[in-house]
Amino acid sequence: MIKSIQYFMLGLCLIGFPWASRAAEPPAVSFEQGGDKLQITIGQRPFATYVWEDEQIHRPYFCHLHSPHGVQVTRNHPPIEGQDSTDHASFHPGLWLSFGDIDGADFWRNQARTEFIEFVQPPRGSAGRGEFVVKNHYLANDQKLICEEICRYTIVVHPAGYYLLVRSRFTSDREFVFGDQEEMGLGVRVNTPMTVQKGGQILNSDGLKNEKEAWGKTSAWCDYSGVVDGVPAGVTLMPSPNNFRPCWFHARDYGLLAANPFGRNAFTQQEKSRVTVAPGTAFQLEFGVFIHDTTPLDRSALDAAYQEFLRLIKN
């Protein structure tokens, strides 16, 4: 544990934030709404864009996520011909929570619609923290309501990087079922130069690397890191231990990383998962996303970042 803390503190020094000491105030998280988008900045730097209405992508998503040093860690949206690989352009816009099978409806591939209803809590920003809560309706192909989602997004500015906490609660007045597919859960498509194919690296909490070792494995966290224009950056997906079961990771060398607690058969060929939510009960999912400026050769720094995530979700 001491070694983990030492690596974590090394990350703070490498980032070099002037407010890393207790006496300094972290930069403020700010929101600016325009049309169907929410522009999010931290200090004077862009952090991300949250989009809740898109003609081609039938679900809310974040795009153009940035690290503390301003490195874009997600692929350009839309992908730029000649600069990005252009596969799955409407499936992988940046960072998203979606599901390939709820009651047989496919939200991941935009065959069914996740409809934004309202901000339950309008965006509120302050020094080192920002938050907003949305209500979404999951609609079947015939436009009938399957379930309602209340999702809370919390942005936390930490000296080692940015945390985006995702807490979703699903309810309905009728039974609904989460099925078993690879394409379920929290996904991110990393910036093209960060991919394993371009020299980047996937690393999980057990030390397994890249698609060959890490695909389909459960782990406490999984990181995707690389170098963009000479600057290191990475994004780590951290499923909460409060979830109903651990996540398997859909980790691909071409740039996709997804934390999926539903794909038991898809990843292990064991009995198909069928998660049934009874009428009037709540089903909850919780994840952390850690965006950082270091590519640690030792996973101790990311272990320490994960411990900080556990502390954050207790508050």
Image: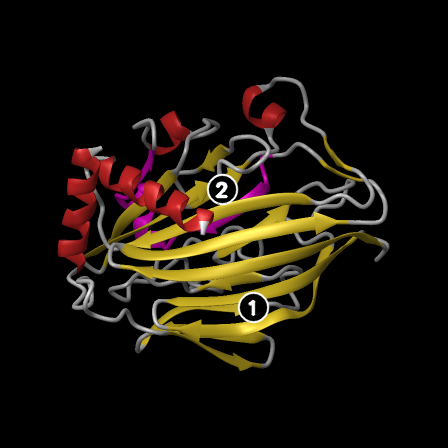
Colouring style: secondary structure
Residue drawn where x is 64% and y is 70% of the image? 119
Residue drawn where x is 44% and y is 30% of the image? 215
Task: Identify residue for label 1.
Answer: 51
Q: In the drawing, does residue 12 fall left or right of residue 82?
A: left
Which residue is more in the foreground, 230 or 14? 14
Task: Identify residue for label 2.
Answer: 258
- Tag 2: Cα neighbours inside 10 Å, few (<14), some, or many (≥20)? many
- Tag 1: Cα neighbours inside 10 Å, few (<14), some, or many (≥20)? some
Would you identify the image quadrant in which residue 178 lies? top right
Q: In the drawing, does residue 96 fall left or right of residue 119?
A: left
Q: In the drawing, does residue 138 fall left or right of residue 128?
A: right
Which residue is more in the foreground, 220 or 56? 220
305 to 244, vertically: above or below: below
**Which comes before the other along the chain, label 2 or label 1?**
1
- Secondary structure, mark 2, is strand
- Secondary structure, mark 1, is strand
Q: Position of residue 101 (x, y in %)?
A: 70, 40
Looking at the picture, which amino acid does disc 2 mark? Ala
Is residue 201 highlighted in magenta?
yes
262 to 96, vertically: above or below: above
Q: CA distance from mark 2 to mark 1?
A: 19 Å
Residue drawn where x is 85% and y is 55% of the image? 144
Q: Is residue 82 visible?
A: no
Is residue 50 highlighted in magenta?
no
Q: Position of residue 195 (x, y in %)?
A: 34, 46
Looking at the picture, which amino acid does disc 1 mark? Val
Q: Position of residue 304 (x, y in %)?
A: 27, 41
Would you identify the image quadrant in which residue 120 lies? bottom right
Magenta segment, which residues? 182-204
